[in-house]
Amino acid sequence: MLKRRTLLSSFAAAGLLGTAAACSPSGGGGDGGSGDDGSDAGGSSGGDQGTLTFRLWDQNAVAAYEESFTAFTEQSGWNVSIDVVPWDDYWTRLPLDIASGDAADVYWLNSANYIQLKDSEALLDINEIVPDGADQWEKSVVDLYTRDGGLWGVPQIWDSIALFYNKELVEEAGVDPSDLVFDPTAETDSLRDAARALTVDEEGNHPDDDGFDPDSRAQFGVNSQADRQAIIGPILASNGAVWQKDDEYTFASPEGIEAFQYMADLINVEHVAPSAADTNENGDFTRDLFTQGKLGLFQSGPYNLLPISEGVEDSFEWALAAPIAGPEGAKSLVHGVVAVGNAQADDDQQEGIAELLTWLGTKEGQLPLAEKGVSFPGHVDAQDAYIAFWEEKGVDVSVFVDAAKDPAEADTGARANAGLTAAIPIFQEVFIGRLTAEEGIPQAQEEGNAAMAE
């Protein structure tokens, strides 16, 4: 086991950041509670075995965990104290707390960061604690956190990608959201046709009409932006491009360059997607357009279900369809958050940590996450409760479950965050039109791989 000083140095050198994709109930990483240094958000009490600490980054999940931990305490005798550390501080605090021995007994972790901690022997192998757990949990998340023969977290929540659509707008335009396909090699396709039908300027002109003014668009067809999870990942995979191999980027293939140029052309040539000048600066820009009734098709994840439901209210009806398909079919990027066990916690805590991890992997332990609408739970038998939560609101979210069955490649590797940090600004230059995909995407691959190799 590495010494704490060595652990801190390895994290600092590797750049343990939280910028890579992570699913979160609130979408952008969570508000994380009050105070920059975290907050005691409650938990459970009354047990006689001692107290375990549990850390997460999203306040929206706290009530569900409080309910879960109350049942856990009654069953095990262990109390659980919940610590909320805001997303912006989470990834700064984590390596410091591990190095000083102050890390929580159990804590949330995302796929972009777990390999560093696993390699530093900071995590418990879940296969040794819950030997039959993997068969009960969402397979795509289990696969994401399986490495070197071990499973390095208990799946808690996950998300995939689907297509939100405005029922009124698509009906008026004669668009079938369940039958949208893109093909960069064709002169046009059903996605471009649908997006043009849904895009209008202030005078009511469509992109194919004489006098159409892209600078005065009042309504847009579809979102296309430098969004790794909702747009880039699914479109690349659907076009047959491979994101990475053996922890190195390979997206600058002919299929990848072709897909990136297609995505950029939806903005700058077809004029059916909002300008990257807006979306590069505000990742929620297209979601807000959708809730305002100004965007017909919005590809995104369940992390936007609550914001859209609350933002739309009764303004218009909306529903979900499968993600937009390409030559290789419809693909969805799947991300998941896991609960990990602190391998360096005191010996007298290890029994409790194992019991808590086991509980967090059960259907009963995760049902509050589903029943309170936090997100899709990791246990497959608890997912129906989340589907039922949204059925009561008139939304069929089962499409996300179907989309998760054939996922695109997620970001993996000890330096995944560093790679994305280097690549995303170049992607943004392609989306805004200052670089062609042929110019920018090989550069993004080279700089991303260089960052991951440092």
Image: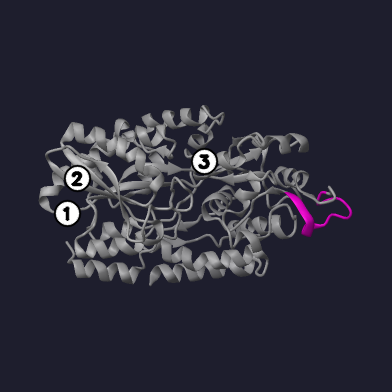
Q: Which residue is mark 1?
A: 345
Q: Secondary structure at mark 1?
A: loop
Q: CA distance from mark 2 to mark 1?
A: 9 Å
Circle 2/circle 1 CB separation < 8 Å? yes
Check disc 2 and give the amino acid type. Ile
| Quadrant of image for the N terminus | bottom left
For the point 56% across and 56% down, the residue is: 283
Magenta residues span 206-219
**Which comes before the other along the chain, label 3 or label 2?**
3
Q: Is 374 on the left or on the right of 347, as rendered?
A: right
Check disc 1 and give the amino acid type. Ala
Q: Is residue 326 above or below residue 373?
A: below
For the point 53% across and 55% down, the residue is: 228
Q: Position of residue 381 (x, y in %)?
A: 37, 29
Q: Is residue 407 above or below residue 262?
A: above
Instruction: Kindly report which numbered mark, 3 or 1, lies closer to the viewer in this rendering.
Output: 3
Q: Is 236 on the left or on the right of 366, as rendered?
A: right
Q: Which residue is mark 2?
A: 353
Q: Does residue 353 appear in the picture of this structure?
A: yes
Check disc 3 and give the amino acid type. Leu
Q: Does residue 327 appear in the picture of this structure?
A: no
Q: CA distance from mark 3 to mark 2?
A: 32 Å
| Quadrant of image for the C terminus | bottom left
